[in-house]
Amino acid sequence: MEKESKLTVAPEQIRYANILFYGTWGGILVLSILFLLYAAGLITPFVPSAQVPAYWGMNVHDYNARLNLPAGWGWVGMLMYGDYLNFIGIAFLGLLTIIGYLVLIPYYLKSKDLTYATIAGLEVIILLLAASGVLRVAH
């Protein structure tokens, strides 16, 4: 007969997992809706659908140079185009980890667990610096 194990999960871990779970499904929903608007032609794209196959064989650098596209956070200025609108959902998915850590910090401070509060705070700072483009990895 198997022995039944009792696994306990800390409330802050459940909160973090719920943020990731529901946030991911919310992000997928946003991506789906925005893609449907784009695919239905309800929002004008920057690159018309008929021209997309002409760019399929290009690498990212050549594609960006050919179309004179902005780098980094320049996509924010392109949100009026249907093919850039999907970046909202992608950016939201990328922010979920930061949101999750921000929610954890008060839990750790309340329980006087300064080590984990510090780690979570440093994670937020590092992720925000990386997202801003300040921290880069050369390749």
Image (tube, grey):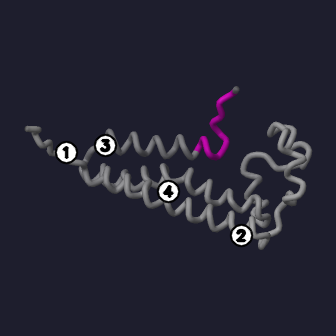
- The label shown at residue 114 is 3
Percent of width and height locating residue 128: 57, 46
The answer to which of 32 and 2 lies nearer the viewer is 2
Q: Magenta segment, principal secondary structure?
A: loop
Q: Nearer the viewer, mark 2 or mark 3?
A: 2
Distance between mark 2 and mark 3 Cα atoms = 46 Å
Q: Looking at numbered disc 1 in the image, what kind of residue is underneath it?
A: Leu
Distance between mark 2 and mark 1 Cα atoms = 44 Å
Q: Looking at numbered disc 2 in the image, what kind of residue is underneath it?
A: Leu
Q: Looking at numbered disc 3 in the image, what kind of residue is underneath it?
A: Leu
Magenta residues, as a range? 129-138
The numbered mark, 2 or 1, whose residue comes first in the sequence reads 1
The numbered mark, 2 or 3, whose residue comes first in the sequence reads 2
Distance between mark 3 and mark 4 Cα atoms = 29 Å
Percent of width and height locating residue 86: 68, 59
Residue 18, above or below 61: below
Percent of width and height locating residue 87: 68, 56
Q: Nearer the viewer, mark 3 or mark 4?
A: 4
Circle 4 packing at 10 Å, graded few (<14), some (14-19), many (20+), is some
Q: Which residue in the structure is indicated by mark 4?
A: 24
Residue 98, above or below 3: below
Q: Looking at numbered disc 4 in the image, what kind of residue is underneath it?
A: Thr
Q: Which residue in the structure is indicated by mark 1?
A: 7
User: What is the quadrant of the N terminus in the image?
Assistant: top left
The numbered mark, 4 or 1, whose residue comes first in the sequence reads 1
The numbered mark, 3 or 4, whose residue comes first in the sequence reads 4
User: Which quadrant of the structure image shows residue 91?
Assistant: bottom right
Q: Which residue in the structure is indicated by mark 2?
A: 37
User: What is the quadrant of the C terminus in the image?
Assistant: top right
